Amino acid sequence: MPIAPVFASYEHPFSTPACLDGVLEVIEAAPFVFAMRGDLGLAGLMALGADAGAVGTSSTVRNLWLPRKNSGSNRSRTILVPAAASWVPLTDLAEAVLEPRAGEPFRCDCPVCGDGGDVRDLLSVGAAIQREHSNAAAIALVRQIAAASDPVARWREVCERAADTYARFDTDGIMPASRPPMLDAWLTWLG
Ligand SMILES: [Zn+2]
């Protein structure tokens, strides 16, 4: 009989290495694991042995956040920034300062953005196309990790690159984005 454990928290449910230990226990014990409603962390879960996964297409269907007073009322729409392995609020992206085409942190080669595309170009398109980009880029990233000869090593590279991207956002004053605790948890857990 299928069993569906739900990981929920006031913060990101996988925001500490201990949370990742717990989910790994589930992955190791179950004969088949389908990780649903995830963000890019599910690429990590698949690298560690989950059989399949589904990335949530909007923040309301990615992970389960416990209800809190006044939460979510002023959340901006988000868009996936592949180099940061995270969805970044459009309001932050609109304030990003960086020479237009020296934009390695904003590069995206998904089918929507095209070769050498830049996610900031999506600020001027509609929400449906922004979502299409986020979905295409997320799927491409997860597939790349799943197909790697060493998926855990590839996932570690993705997390390290994302940490570098956030460091660059901060030290180069590119934009005010804070590094998600989920990323720190993975980096600590992967060692
Ligand atoms: Zn894209």
Image (tube, rainbow, N blue to C red):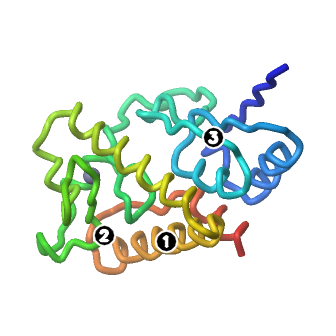
* Residue 103 sits above or below residue 183 on the image: below
* Residue 113 sits above or below residue 71 on the image: below
* Residue 56 sits above or below residue 133 on the image: above
N-terminal of the two: label 1 or label 2? 2
The quarter of the picture where residue 130 lies is top left
N-terminal of the two: label 1 or label 3? 3
Q: Which residue is mark 2?
A: 105
Identify the element where label 2 is drawn: helix
The quarter of the picture where residue 168 lies is bottom left
- Identify the residue at horizontal 37%, vertical 73% (top origin): 170
Q: Position of residue 9 (x, y in %)?
A: 67, 38
Residue 40 seen: yes
Residue type, label 2: Pro
Check whether the beta carbons of the residues at disc 3 and disc 2 lie within 8 A of each other.
no
- Identify the residue at horizontal 33%, vertical 62% (top origin): 176
As drawn, is 136 to the left or to the right of 10?
A: left
Q: Is mark 1 within 8 Å of ligand 1?
A: no
- Identify the residue at horizontal 62%, vertical 72% (top origin): 153
Identify the element where label 3 is drawn: strand
Q: CA distance from mark 1 to mark 3?
A: 25 Å
Q: Which residue is mark 1?
A: 163
N-terminal of the two: label 3 or label 2? 3
Residue type, label 3: Ala
Q: Position of residue 32 (x, y in %)?
A: 77, 37
Farthest residue, direction bottom: 171
- Identify the residue at horizontal 68%, vertical 43% (top origin): 51
Residue 92 seen: no
